Amino acid sequence: MSILMILGGVGICAVFFFLGIYVNQKLSEAKLVSSEKLAQKIIQEAQKEAENCKKSASIAVKEEWYEEKLKFEKETVVKRKDLDRVEKRLVEKEVTLDRRHTLLLDKERELVTKEKNLGTKEKIVRVKAERLDQLIKEQTERLERISILSPEEAKTELLRNLEAEVRNEAATYIKDIRDKAKDNAKKYATEVIAQAVQRCAAAQVVDSTISVVALPGDDMKGRIIGREGRNIRTFENLTGVEVIIDDTPGAVSLSSFDPIRREIARIAMERLIADSRIHPARIEEVVSKVKEEMGEIITAGGEEAVLELGIIGLNSELVRHVGKMKYRTSYGQNLLQHSKEVAYLAGLMAQELELEVATAKRAGLLHDLGKVAGINLEGSHAQIGADIARRYGESDIVANAVAAHHEEVPPGSLYAVLVEAADALSGSRPGARRESIEAYIKRLENLEAIANSFDGVEKAFAIQAGREIRIVVEPEKISDFQAQELAATTAKKIEQELQYPGQIKVTVIRETRAVEFAK
């Protein structure tokens, strides 16, 4: 019985053992399934979170790339403008070098020509020296021959030699008189030509006191003005130029009587508009940079003018003064264009008169140097210009031509006369300088009134913009001799009563008509 109970207990234990194993196995399987589901859920959530992180990172990278792209494009635009500016300067430098090369070639050819001329002159001197040696030898032989002559023969020989010597001296004296007469005639002809050249005419552009800057759109005007006008006030204070913003579409105006300030303001405004960043700090930066570059621009303008005229060896300070002339006007006439024109005219006249063209051009270009020298110097612009020219190594001929071009000092050479004539020609012709229409009409009326004030005058016409007056007289009252006297008297009265540039030609016309009819 006890054995059965033991066996039964063992069986029950075995049953519970296997049942425990089974239950444990089922529980393990259930936990495994639950763990797999939990792992899958965690994996799915991790994948979703990874995708979200990937999308966020992608968006951030795209935004950062776009910002870098915009920054790169702006930097590229700035670099491209800088490269264009550098390229433009390189092109200008290349043109300048080409001009210098051409000028050097011309000077080289001129030196070769002079060397050939010197060789020719050397040959002539050598021939003359040989001829002189021959003459000395002949005279020596003649003296030896005379020494053995009788007194009568020596006297005859002496008289013959004296007669030949007197004839040679007379011929030399006559030649000197003829050469002196030719020189005087040449000087007189030169003065006549210099006066006649003043009747020449050429075109001229008149400058103004306003520069216009184009705008990409009218909305740019608001940006130029700025909030409560801060931008425009800053710009005007830094440049000393008045900015005029009106209803004119696509443009603003810059007004100033100082051309250099107006040019600085124009360049600065164009750069600010191109950059589109307009605020007080940026305006101050751009204006300061343009002011620094203006010295180089002025020097480059002077070098270009000097090279264009073919002038060599001009002091760098004088070149800078010439560059300043580009931004200076006189009676509305651009001073650099006027000075270049005077240089060309003086050079052409010097060439016709067989004078040094380079000296005439040099004096013509520098004749108004005193107008850009500054306001701290005393004296007329002609005298100031002459002092500056001497200070920087110019010759006395050039300095005198500068000082005498307004007849303040006597001309020391013909170059001074040529510069004076060229200056009068450039400044006094019609259209060269600004003159109000009222003053112009009044001057013509006064000119005609003076001509009509004489007895025997039938009509008078002011023509050639007041540069000539033609007077028609009554032939019954005015004879041919009186017509010549009337022209001289009218010219003298015009000189006394009118103020005018240059000269006025007076022409008196006397006409007699005899009419008959054949029947």
Image (cartoon, rainbow, N blue to C red):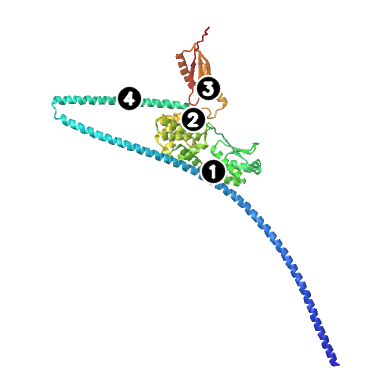
- Is 94 rendered above or below residue 503? below
Q: What amino acid type is highlighted by mark number 2?
A: Ser
Q: Nearer the viewer, residue 402 or 90?
A: 90
Residue under label 3, please give it.
463
Which quadrant holds residue 148?
top left
- Which label lies toward us, 1 or 3? 3
**What residue is pinned by disc 1?**
291
Task: Return the residue nearer the eye: 454 or 157.
Answer: 157
Q: CA distance from mark 2 to mark 4?
A: 38 Å
- Structural distance between the alpha carbons of marks 3 and 2: 19 Å
N-terminal-most mark, 1 or 3: 1
The numbered mark, 4 or 3, whose residue comes first in the sequence reads 4
Q: CA distance from mark 1 to mark 3?
A: 47 Å
Task: Find numbered disc 3 in the image and state the secondary structure of the residue it sits on.
Answer: strand
Q: Foreground residue, 119 or 262?
A: 119
Residue 180 placed where, x, y %?
A: 33, 26
